[in-house]
Amino acid sequence: MNKKLLTYMAVFGPGIVVMFADTDAGSVITAAQSGAVWGYKLLLLQIILIPIVYVVQELAVRLGLLTNQGHGELIKKYFGQKWAWLSVSTLAVACIGALITEFAGIAGAGMLFGIPSWLSVSVVVVLLTVMAWTGSYRSVERIAIIFGAFELIFLVVAWQAHPNVSAMIKGLTEVPWRSHGYIYLAVANIGAVIMPWMVFYHQSAVVDKGLSEKHLKAARWDTAIGAVVTQLIMIAILVATAATIGKYHPGQSLNTVQQIADALTPYLGKTVGIILFSLGLIGASLVAAVVVSLAAAWGLGEVGGFKHSLQDHPKEAPWFYIVYTLVLIIGGIVVVSGVNLITLSVAVQVMNAALLPIVLGFLYLLALKALPKEYKLSTFYAVVVGIVVVSTSLMGVYAGVTSVF
């Protein structure tokens, strides 16, 4: 095995993990809703989002590797304490919202097998707490990748649904942009793919892993592969529901995880359908719960000034581990309270989109200010990234306004 390949293997991890987490329970539910209600008409958007999510996350990687500082630390350094707290406050809101959807997915999957939600959620909270308190960054990363790999099961589910290729191609050209319902789900999909906590996690992860400037090329490949994989999973979920629910019950909205599973099982086989769907959903929820909790703990640690590394023992960084555990507990309590999980999950994705102007705005400004001269954005690429940031942020604002009014 040559030295270059060994280097790439050593660097790979943060991008794969954050992208697996990107296809979390809320994203699974949003993609399933999209396929069930609109068939293949949101398929083109999923493809377009591949380069967009890469552009955003590559900036986070570049900033982390070349400054050796997390996102919150850089905002504090270049824009001051108040702006840093504003940014990390949006992170906290997004993390709590995301954790609710992760535990909702776990609870929903557990109920398919008759396990009460309080039990499945409690077990996961304890499991993830022990994992972080007793492990290192590398051990947590490996476990997260194993969790996330279960999401690849959705590719099997899509294949077993026997989608019509000609219908998929036709769906790529049909964009009912005048429909409020279509636009709402389109924005929810954007919020499901580009999330505030992804930026904080990715930038802090490459720092905590000990990566540096020399690892930039490999880290970019890690991010690019992750971007393709996460969107293939989203596409698989959309295709599976479009080929089943969208074909036989077009326009049918889904209100529970049980409904999604029940809608798929007549075409996949009851036992096989439930097992495959549950494994994929649980894997997605677990890896995202790890990433979201760490993002919150890293972000608050960076701005609050307390130790914030998985390399530190809990006695050395008590507040880091307390924050990590506390967000898990809060998310778990909300889920077992009995709220409507599907409605909440889609609403959280829209909330993520509404928060994007703050997160992406700071990310773009830092890319212009904090990077060394030789790594700054070229004029053309800066314009391209600016267009991506502005257009994505405007859609987020649109989502926030339309959801309120």
Image (spheres, grey):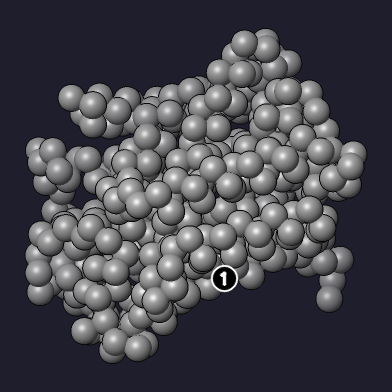
Q: Is 28 rendered above or below residue 203?
A: below
Number of marks in the image? 1
Image quarter for residue 400? top left
- Location of residue 17 with respect to 317 vertically, above or below: below
Rendered image quadrant of residue 404: top left
Residue 56 x/y as whole percent: 53, 38
Q: Residue at x 43, y 68 (%)?
A: 116
Q: Secondary structure at mark 1?
A: helix
Quickly name the residue at label 1: 149
- Residue 55 seen in this snapshot: no
- Given residues 166 and 287, the one toward you in this image is 287
Q: In this image, 293 relative to 108: left or right? A: right
Q: Residue at x 36, y 68 (%)?
A: 236
Instruction: Find residue 363 and report its horizontal and vertical position in percent.
Output: 57, 27
Q: Which of these two is toward me, 322 or 178? A: 322
Looking at the image, which residue is at 55% across and 25% down?
89
**Amino acid at circle 1:** Ala
Quarter of the picture containing the N terminus is: bottom right
Quick check: can you spot residue 83? yes
> Which of the image's four quarters has the C terminus?
top left
Depicted 181 relative to depicted 268: above or below: above
**Who's the residue at 71% across and 23% down the image?**
303
Q: Is residue 189 left or right of residue 131?
A: left
Q: Is residue 160 left or right of residue 321?
A: left
